[in-house]
Image: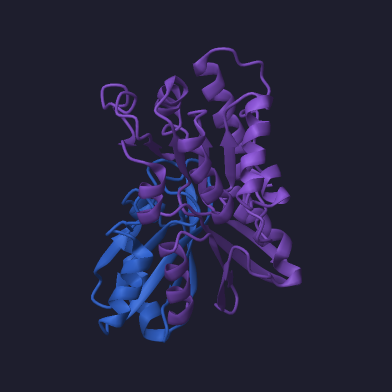
Chain colours: A blue, B purple
C-alpha cells in the first residue's frame, strides 16, 4: 500500500535529469511483433552524454537507440526506429528472440 | 514531449491516478490526460478503451497516426479481516497482480504464521486508513462480519471511489449493515455499489472457493470500471 515510486522509473528520471539541466531523449516501444522482450509502452531515457535508464528490449537494441538519441537531442526532430530479424541491421543490432519492435524516440523540450 | 506534459504525467502517477499520453507520431505533439478528465470527442473511444484494458494502442484517427500510452497505478487489494478466506486470497491475489494488505485488529487472527506473503497490519482500520487512504485503484473486501471492524472501512472505500467494495455476510447481515450505513448518512447510490453477498455466483462453498469468487468479482470490476466519469466502481 505504499506510494513509493521505483527509483529506476524512466519517466521520473527524465523529469529529474531535465531539471538538472541535462538534455534528455525519451524512447518508447510503440509496436511489437512476435516475442518482443519488452511490452508496448516501455520507456528508455537517454541524456546528452549517453547515460540511460530503463529499457526497450532485453538489452539487444539499447545501444542503437542511444546512438540515435544523440541525433534527436541535437535536431529536436522525433524519429521512429524499427528493429528485428527482418531489419537489414539485424545482424548488428537485432533481437535474438526473433521479434520485431518499433521505437518512438523524442526529445524532452521545455 | 513537452516538459509540462511529462510533469503532469508524473504528478498523476505519483498520486496513483490513471493517465494516458496521446502522441501524434507525425508532428510529435503529445498530450496527457488523467482518468476522469473529459477527453476530446474524437479520441474518447480509444482513450477509454486503453484506460480500461491497461494496454497501449496505435490508432489512426482523422488521418493522424496516434500512439496512446497508458499508465495505470498497480491495483491494490485491502482486506479487512485476517480470516480463512483471506488466507486463500493471500495465496493467489498477489499472483494476479494485486498489491495486498490485510487489516485486522484481532491479534489472534492477524498472525504472521497465518499470513506469510502479504502485508498484515494488526490495528484498527480507522487508524490504518487515516495514514494510508484508499483510492480508486484499490479494491476493498470486508470479511469479518463484525460491524465494529467492517463498517468504517466500507464507508471510507465508498467515499474514496474504490473500484470495488465487497462485504461478506448473508442477505440478512447485509440488510442490517445497510440500515447502519444509511443511519450514518451514506447515500443509497453508494450503498448499492457494495457487492453483497460478496463474490461472483459460482456456487462457491469452501473458503478457498469463496476467495476465487471474490477475486474474480474484483477483476471484473477492475476491467469494467467507469473510466470517464467520477463513479468509481459500478
Determine whether, in the image, residue B154 is placed left or right of residue A4. right
- Residue B121 to residue B69: above or below: above
**Where is residue B213, by image quadrant?**
top right
| Horizontal and vertical percent position of residue A81 | 47, 64
Residue at image position (65%, 48%) is B225
Residue at image position (57%, 55%) is B159
For the C terminus of chain A, the image quarter is bottom left
| Horizontal and vertical percent position of residue B151 | 53, 41
Instruction: Evaluate whether residue B200 shows in this view.
Output: no
| Horizontal and vertical percent position of residue B47 | 65, 61
Determine whether, in the image, residue B154 is placed left or right of residue A92. right
Determine whether, in the image, residue B72 is placed left or right of residue A70. right
> How many numbered marks, from 0 up?
0
Of the pair A38 and A14, the residue shown nearer to us: A14
**Where is residue B199, by image quadrant?**
top right
Residue at image position (58%, 36%) is B166
**Where is residue A27, by image quadrant?**
bottom left
Instruction: Evaluate whether residue A52 shows in this view.
Output: yes
Q: Which residue lies most toward the front here?
A: B183
| Horizontal and vertical percent position of residue A3 | 36, 56
Residue at image position (36%, 49%) is B127
Amino acid at each position: 500500500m505504499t506510494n513509493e515510486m521505483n527509483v529506476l522509473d524512466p519517466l521520473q528520471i527524465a523529469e529529474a535529469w531535465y531539471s538538472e539541466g541535462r538534455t534528455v531523449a525519451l524512447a518508447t516501444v510503440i509496436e511489437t511483433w512476435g516475442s518482443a522482450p519488452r511490452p508496448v509502452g516501455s520507456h528508455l531515457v537517454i541524456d546528452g552524454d549517453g547515460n540511460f535508464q530503463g529499457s526497450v528490449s532485453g538489452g539487444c537494441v539499447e545501444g542503437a537507440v542511444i546512438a540515435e538519441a544523440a541525433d534527436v537531442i541535437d535536431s529536436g526532430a522525433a524519429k521512429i526506429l524499427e528493429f528485428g530479424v527482418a531489419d537489414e541491421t539485424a545482424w548488428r543490432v537485432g533481437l535474438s528472440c526473433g521479434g520485431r519492435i518499433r521505437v518512438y524516440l523524442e526529445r524532452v523540450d521545455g | 514531449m513537452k516538459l509540462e506534459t511529462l510533469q503532469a504525467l508524473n504528478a498523476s502517477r505519483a498520486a496513483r491516478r490513471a493517465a494516458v499520453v496521446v502522441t501524434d507520431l507525425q508532428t510529435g505533439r503529445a498530450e496527457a490526460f488523467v482518468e476522469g478528465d473529459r477527453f476530446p470527442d474524437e479520441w474518447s473511444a480509444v482513450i477509454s478503451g486503453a484506460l480500461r484494458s491497461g494496454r497501449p494502442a496505435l490508432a489512426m484517427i482523422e488521418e493522424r497516426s496516434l500512439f496512446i500510452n497508458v499508465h495505470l497505478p498497480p491495483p491494490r487489494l485491502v482486506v479487512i479481516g485476517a480470516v480463512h478466506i483471506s488466507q486463500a486470497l493471500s495465496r493467489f491475489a498477489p499472483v494476479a497482480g494485486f498489491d495486498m494488505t490485510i487489516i485486522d485488529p484481532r491479534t489472534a487472527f492477524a498472525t504472521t504464521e497465518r499470513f506469510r506473503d502479504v502485508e498484515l497490519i494488526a490495528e484498527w482500520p480507522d487508524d490504518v486508513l487515516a495514514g494510508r487512504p484508499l483510492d480508486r485503484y484499490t479494491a476493498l473486501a470486508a470479511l469479518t462480519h463484525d460491524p465494529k471492524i467492517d463498517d468504517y472501512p466500507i464507508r471510507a472505500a465508498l467515499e474514496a471511489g474504490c473500484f470495488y467494495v465487497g462485504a461478506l455476510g448473508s442477505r440478512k447481515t447485509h440488510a442490517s449493515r445497510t440500515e447502519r450505513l444509511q443511519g450514518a448518512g451514506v447515500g443509497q447510490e453508494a450503498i448499492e455499489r457494495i457487492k453483497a453477498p460478496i463474490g461472483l455466483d459460482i456456487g462457491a462453498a469452501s473458503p478457498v472457493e469463496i476467495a476465487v469468487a471474490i477475486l474474480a468479482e474484483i477483476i471484473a470490476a477492475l476491467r469494467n470500471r467507469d473510466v470517464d466519469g467520477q463513479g468509481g466502481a459500478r
